[in-house]
Amino acid sequence: MTFVSVIDWSAILKIVVLDIMLGVDNTIVIALACAALPAVLRLRALLLGTLGADVLRGVLLAAANYVMDIPYLKITAGAYLLYIGYKLLVAGNDDNPTVEQHDTVLASIWTIIDFRCCRL
C-alpha cells in the first residue's frame, strides 16, 4: 500500500473547508488594517503581514511542542483554557473588534500579525 492510498481524502477536504470558513474573519481584519495605505503599499503590507503571522504561528507551535514534555504542564494549560473559556462566556458578546487603520506599512503589518496570532 502506498502512502497516498492510506490518506483519508474526505477528512482532509473537511479540514481545508473548515479552515477557509474560519479564515474569513482574518481576511476582513487584514483588509481593514491595510485600507488606509496607498494602493502601491497595500499588497506589500498584506503579504508581509500574512507571512509574518504564519511564521510566528510556526515558531509558537514548535515551542509549544517542545515544552509539552514538562511535567504537569498539560494539566495547568487545561485549567488555564477552562479559565479563558469561562472569562469569554461571562464577558458577553464582543463580535465587533476595533481594527485601527494605519498609514505606514509596518504598523499595518503589526496589526495583521497581532490579530492573526495573538488575539483570542
Image (cartoon, helix red, strand yellow):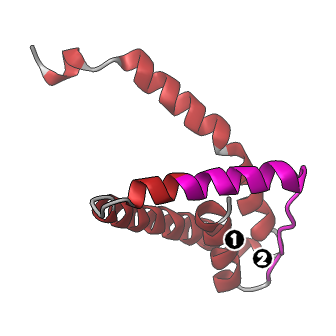
Q: Nearer the viewer, residue 5 or 67?
A: 67
Question: What is the crowding at mark 1: few (fewer than 14 residues within 10 Å), some, or many (at least 20)?
Answer: some
Q: Secondary structure at mark 2?
A: loop
Horizontal and vertical percent position of residue 37: 77, 76
Q: Quarter holding the N terminus?
A: top left
Front-most of residues 84 and 64: 84
Quarter the C terminus occupies: bottom right
Q: Nearer the viewer, residue 25 or 103?
A: 25
Q: Amino acid at mark 1?
A: Arg
Answer with left or right where residue 71 lies relative to residue 32: left
x, y percent for residue 71: 30, 61
Residue drawn at x 87%, y 66% as measured from the top left: 98
Q: Is residue 83 above or below residue 4?
A: below
Q: Which mark is residue 108?
A: none
Say whether marks 1 and 2 touch (CB < 8 Å).
Answer: yes
Q: Magenta segment: does it hold 81?
A: yes
Binning the other alpha carbons within 10 Å of mark 2 as few (below 14), some (14 to 19) or many (20 upward) gives: some
Residue stretch rendered in magenta on the structure? 79-102
**Residue at (35, 67) in percent of width and height:** 63
Instruction: Tell me how far mark 1 sits from mark 2, CA to CA.
Output: 6 Å
Callout 1: helix, strand or loop?
A: helix
Circle 2 is placed at which residue position?
Answer: 37
The residue pinned by badge 1 equals 42
Pinpoint residue 106: horizontal percent, then vertical percent.
64, 84
Task: Compare residues 15 and 66 and report the one nearer the observer.
Answer: 66
Q: Is residue 106 left or right of residue 61?
A: right
The amino acid beneath tag 2 is Leu
The residue at the point 56 percent across, 54 percent down is 79
Q: Position of residue 84 (x, y in %)?
A: 68, 57
**Residue 22 part of the magenta-drawn span:** no
